[in-house]
Amino acid sequence: MKLSAIAFLAVALLAGVAAAKRDRKLDDENKSNYTVTDEAWFDFVIYDYPEKGDDLKGSIRLGLFGKTTPMTVMNFKEITKGFNRGNLKLKYKGSYVHKIVQDFTIQMGDVVVGDGSGSKSIYGDKFLDENFILSHSGLGLVAMANHGPDTNGCQFFVTLSKARWLDGKHVVFGKLIEGFDFLYQMNEVPANAKYGPSRTIKITDCGIDEITPYDLTDDEYEGNFDLRKNTA
């Protein structure tokens, strides 16, 4: 074999190795965006459902991406635990699901007024859109509700379908990892013309659990199945 041919093969081999390393690096970077650093749990009751006098209880568990969206997750965690500073008291416990867009989103977290018109954060009345790294590319994704750019507060929603057109408009910061069955039960509650649920759906309790951080795969991030692992 001529020297030039050997040199060509060597260059091609090195280029292939470099490309493989670059692809692995990109895969690792994408994977790290799905690192769950904390888990939040929420207990609910749907009053007079499915029939009057019946109360349906259920729970969901959310994995929070505190490495990718630390400011947003900090706000969410503090309100979940109950935030008190001077006259400012914010807590999801005792608040309500106020909006159900069937097969699209379920929205909650207005700890100020309760009907979707109120908003506060631990940083003030509102805070900036942290980033739009994560996509609304699957079911059970948790994102901040807002009234336009940089108006995040306490309200959030959970997706019931892929909604990529929301990318760049809402900050995704979590993923439902347990409780899809109950999420779908909430989705079946009839809503009025303004998407207000016909039954009262209340958060009866909530909290944050310490965990060993773990990464979600693409399928886990986008899927509609329960998962939970590496909890401390």
Image (tube, rainbow, N blue to C red):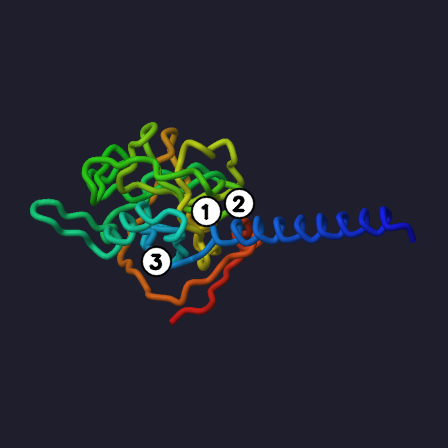
SS for callout 2: loop
With respect to residue 157, does 1 lie above or below? below
- Residue 25 is situated, as x and y percent measured from the top left of the image, at 57, 52
| Secondary element at image label 1 | strand
Q: How many marks?
A: 3
Q: Which mark is residue 40?
A: 3
Q: Which residue occupies 90% across, 50% down? A: 2
Residue at image point 39% right, 54% down: 64
Please name the residue shown 34% across and 59% down the image: 41
Of residues 220 and 185, which is closer to you in this image? 220
Looking at the picture, which amino acid does disc 1 mark? Answer: Leu
- For label 3, count other residues whose C-alpha is less than 10 Å away and answer few (under 14), some (14-19) or many (20+): many
- Vertical placement of residue 58 versus 132, above or below: below
**Kind of residue sitting beneath label 3:** Ala
Identify the mark at residue 141; answer none if there is no mark: 1
Q: Are discs 3 and 2 less than 8 Å apart at CB?
A: no
Question: Residue sitting at 28 percent across and 51 percent down?
Answer: 74
